[in-house]
Amino acid sequence: SNLMPSQLPHKLSVSAGPDLNSNRRSVIQSREYVLSFAACVGNKQIVKMLVAHGAPLNAQDTLGNTVLHMLVLHTDKSMACKMYNFISSLISKENMEHLENITNSHGLNPMKLSAYEADVEMFSHFMMKRRQVYWAFGPVSSSLYDLTGIDTWGDTFSVLDIICSSKKKEARKLLNITPVREVLHHKWTNHGFKFFMLWTTLYILYLIMFTLCCVSRPLTPAGAGGDNITIMVVKPLNVRTDPLLSLIPKALNSLCFLFSFSHNLGNCFLIVISRIVYGCLVLITMILRVLNHEWETVIMAYALISAWCNVIYFARGFKLLGPLCIMIQKMIFGDLMRFCYVLIIVIIGFGAGFNVHFQALNPHIYSYFKDFPITIFTLFQLMMGLTELQGTPHIMIPDIIIVLYMVYMCFGFLLLLNLFIALMGDTHFRVVSERKSLWKAQIASTTLLLERRLPAWLWARTGIPGDLLGLDAGKWYLRHLKEFHRIF
């Protein structure tokens, strides 16, 4: 206590560690400024004394954090909120607003830092400080919330952007806090859903046209050079007797338009990969069409599958299908990927074992095991229960093959397949409780992406100008009605 007054005239709030005795140095070095240290330990008397003697509240440490940033990072949220209010009572409102707008080295002010840390309690405290009661009549009240730093308009690093890009599970809870919930609801219902439906309609129309171009492509007889299976081949480009060929340039134009429009839309890794693969497959199909190559049909088939799988992305805009897509995504990148990894190892191992023995047998009798690729495919069918081990009572099967078959079915079918089903059930149990919040987070992300990509004249700004409310000009506010239900 005798140390503090002696150091106050020298403004101890600038790096006071070396001025303290050795017993306290290890503790003080955790905070670069005495003011931040006093605030974090909850000593209001020392904080008040430091501020009264001119200790600058805007002093920043090596990471750019002020005393308010340190309170946000404090583990005791209740004490941090009380100290935050105490510091705000020591200075004027204008100085407090200036202090709250100071950003650290990561570009985060205290409010944005609480959103970045997914701190529900501290972020709720900031929102309550921004709340201004506009009018109240009985149990009904109208409140105004300052949207500065919250809304994305004119701010490329807003609170909404931070929440939607966060990987933390607790960040989804911030979407239910007023006014974040109301801002996102207004953006989605008034603008986002309409443009999302328009985008969905355009994509489906394009997809139908692209599918018709593929399934209605002109064919010609294979001729004498064909095999016994292929009787029709694609008609060369130099023979344009079918009017459906004129649809191919239109399909290409539509593809270029929609691919360029949706290139930066959607933050789901699965959708991004699917869209890139789809665009590359269509481009390869066009090249092979010009070259009149036989692989055109193969690439086109995969392009059609990828194109229709992209429709899953648009299901996120609907409440009925959105949570289901979340479940599919979790199972694909969780259980299915791990299952496929183990399955590939097992099938290759058993496939090599089967192929070694079937190499010495007649391939015309055992056609399903005549070579290694066919053996791999047959084993996959056997594991899924789509076929059975081929053979007749008059043909002897070596005992070693029967033993391998029994071991494979016990390991591949009974163990792996049932384990995969159990894993999917466990994933469903874990995700079912949070799929709704995950879906809301995807809706919020989609809303912000649409707002970024569309021109400003198509997307009105959310809120009410401050000058119309008699408040600060240049700021925008959100009006929120709340009714308190009283039980007498």
Image (cartoon, helix red, strand yellow):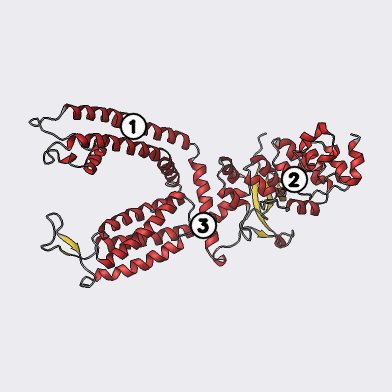
Q: Which element type, helix, strand or loop, lies under badge 3?
A: helix
Residue 68 numbered mark, or none:
2
- Mark 1 or mark 3: which comes first in sequence? 3
The answer to whether the residue labelled 1 contacts the one labelled 3, judged by CB atoms less than 8 Å apart, is no
Quick check: 369 left or right of 426?
A: left
The answer to whether the residue labelled 3 contacts the one labelled 2, judged by CB atoms less than 8 Å apart, is no
Q: Which element type, helix, strand or loop, lies under badge 2?
A: helix
| Crowd band around label 3 with a 10 angstrom C-alpha radius: few (<14), some (14–19), many (20+) | many
Residue placed most toward the observer, 44 or 380: 380
Which residue position holds label 1? 416
Residue placed most toward the observer, 107 or 311: 107
- Say which amino acid is labelled 3: Gly
Q: Which mark's residue is nearer the viewer, 3 or 2?
A: 2
Which residue position holds label 3? 192
Quadrant location of the C terminus in the rendered image: top right
| Crowd band around label 1 with a 10 angstrom C-alpha radius: few (<14), some (14–19), many (20+) | some
Quick check: 423 left or right of 118?
A: left
- Mark 2 or mark 1: which comes first in sequence? 2
